[in-house]
Amino acid sequence: MRVALALGVALIIIVFTQESILRLGILQRLELASVDYRFQYRGVNQGIRDSAHVVIVEINEESFRSLRAQFPWPRSFYAHLLRNLKAAGARSVGIDLLFSTPDIHDPRHDDSLRVALTATGIGVLSGKREADNESYITTSSDETFGNIFYSTDHAMGLVNVRTDADGVFRSYNTMYAVDSAGGGEQRIPTLAFAVLNKYFGLPPTAVPEVFDGYFTYAGRVIPQIDRASMMINYYGPDGTFPHIRFHDVLDDETLQTNEEAESGEQINTFSDPSFGYLHDGTFKDKIVLVGVTVPEYKDLFPVAIARGERKRENMMYGVEIHANTVENVIRGDFLRMESPAASATTTFVLVLITFIVTSQLREVKTRHHLVIGLLGFLFALSMILLTGALALFMFTKFNYVMGVVNAVLAIVGGYSMSTTYHMVTERKERMLIKSMFSTYVNPSLVDELVAHPEKLVLGGQREELTVLFSDIVGFTAISENLSPEELVSILNEYLEVMSGIIFRNDGTLDKYEGDAVMAFWGAPIPQQDHAVRACKAALEMQDALVGLNAAWQEAGRPPIRIRIGINTGDMVVGNMGAVGKFAYTVIGDSVNLASRLEGANREYGTGVMVNQRTYDLACEEVIGRELDRIAVMGRSEPVTTYELIAVRSAEIPQETLDLIGAYEEGKRLYHAREWAKAEQAFRRALVARPDDRPSLLHLQRIEVFKQTPPPENWNGVFVFKSK
């Protein structure tokens, strides 16, 4: 009887969650909303801006102001663009604009574009079909799809993109099939695949081959969501891909912008040999998409990922939608939908498990009926949470779009059927279950704690993490010369900038203590590169302070300096405090050492000091130098410390490199007790940086050691007498 009930519930849920019915009701919208949440949960692909195969050339308000012609511009501008991009190494250029009528300025501009399309061989035009259904249209032999240049170059892609039931753009047609006037069917690629044809060296009219459940294209297998479409795997909200302004690509010796006319100087952002796009590799072997990024031109659409939670923050320009699709195909980075068979199997399994387990719980004989009922409810709730967590994990790690609505309905159905069954058979148990539902509610849990309820308990675990302490130098003295309002304004602005840097580097902001900031990396989400992230954050904090100080000095406010200490080591991380009031934090000797290193900067005149373990883990990404072996208060073992100087990917001045080389030579000779040679090396370091405090300190020690040599067992440790 029970098994039959469970199977009946599973069959009903499977029927009502099939796509043909989902399209008619709220269930489909709930499923689509869950997909959007998964995009939002996964967040922005932080590396896409530096590694993207696509560059967007945007026509924006700045381009309108800069170019000496009124929009719509002469077609010769686009010819100029194609030639410049060809010279810069672009492999394919998609122009997301419809040239539906002759040039309004001069027909000769149209001829210029025709010549450029043929000469460069990299241009892809845009066309648009009249949408009479999802996949097909009847056309005539002279159809130009809204682009007068279609007959010039058959490298054209259609820009039509269809929305889902809720009006959001999540899918992308790979092609459109049209019936030609001469008979037969013609398949025309959409814009993304038209530019990819150029990129992969395929014929202009090449389209993905359609199979049952997937497409094949350029050696890639693309999962279908219907016979015509794939699902777009968005890398982030609008602005995720690199954007270059249209007029900056045109600005060479042959074109004068309004800025150049006003200033009388040639800027030449494209062709300048020092910084121009022609030489810096920005467009080398890239796909370039050209489109308008001005809201008034109505090429702005709702998509599955947003910048925030406010209304209309999920809007994206059409050219960026094409860019995401192109990048998906090049990387083979596709979203795969759960198959109907897998969905049905999941539904059956979840209904059976939920029904059987909750039914067995209710049959336990005990006086604590509420506890048993609560356990059944918690089991069903945990199944829902685990299903949601699994859906997030599969999406984030494997690009797999697991059905959530049918799974949740299966769990709810299994639990509800179990509850109903026992309510009918036992009135007393029915009342207990009703009481449980009316009293058990916990609306205050945040999303993370809902997904991970184990974090609600007190306690922690020992992990190797990296912790950062920062402090403003002489803040007390600074605050004495400021009004309370000015002090709060400066402190708030400072903390906002520093906190933003910590968050951008995926750190956990532990606390503020006045002007001091404490953060750590490696928890609650494990990070293999926690030391690297902390070091980069510290260097960015010091760089950001330069900009803050410049702005403050212009406003008549005093500049500030900060000291940062970073330590990597074992520490206890978790929820600390009392029941009902606790905080997620780190404690331990390694945490205290980071604070001591922050203060130790005072002795060496440095800005960022780290321990040996931190530098060993991060040295492939950052450059630093060994400062000293020190013994800080409260710690018996000496600590080898390093000063962080810069990230290795940055352009480092030659003076800094000379300083590091001479200083490290001095340190080696210093530990070898070769005082005279060490003194010479440190003095060379001072030539590169005359006020280098670590070099000056070592020269002072050398003078002492010349008169009174250290003992034979001297290990070079400097003992701190204060914190």
Image (tube, helix red, strand yellow):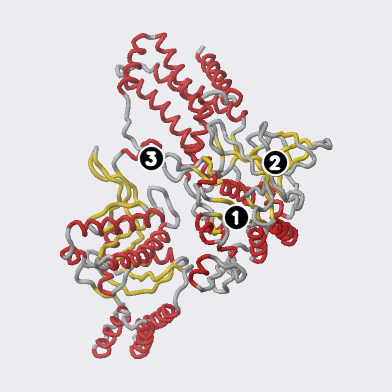
From this view, report whether residue 686 is shown above or below residue 338. Answer: below
Q: Which label sits in the foreground, 2 or 3?
A: 2
From this view, report whether residue 282 is shown above or below residue 677. Answer: above
> Which residue is under mark 1?
54
Give the secondary structure at mark 1. Answer: strand
Tag on residue 547?
Answer: none
- Return the x and y of residue 481 as percentages of the image width and height: 17, 65
For image coordinates 71% across by 51% down, the residue present is 197
For image coordinates 38% across by 40% down, the residue present is 448
User: Do labels 2 and 3 touch, CB within 8 Å?
Assistant: no
- Return the x and y of residue 492 as percentages of the image width and height: 27, 55
Give the secondary structure at mark 2. Answer: strand
Count of labels in the image? 3
Tag on residue 175?
Answer: 2
- Return the x and y of residue 616 as percentages of the image width and height: 42, 66
Pointer 3 local density, CA inside 10 Å: few below 14, some 14–19, many at least 20: few
Which quarter of the picture shows residue 575? top left
From this view, report whether residue 312 is shown above or below residue 498. Answer: above
One can see residue 562 in this view: no
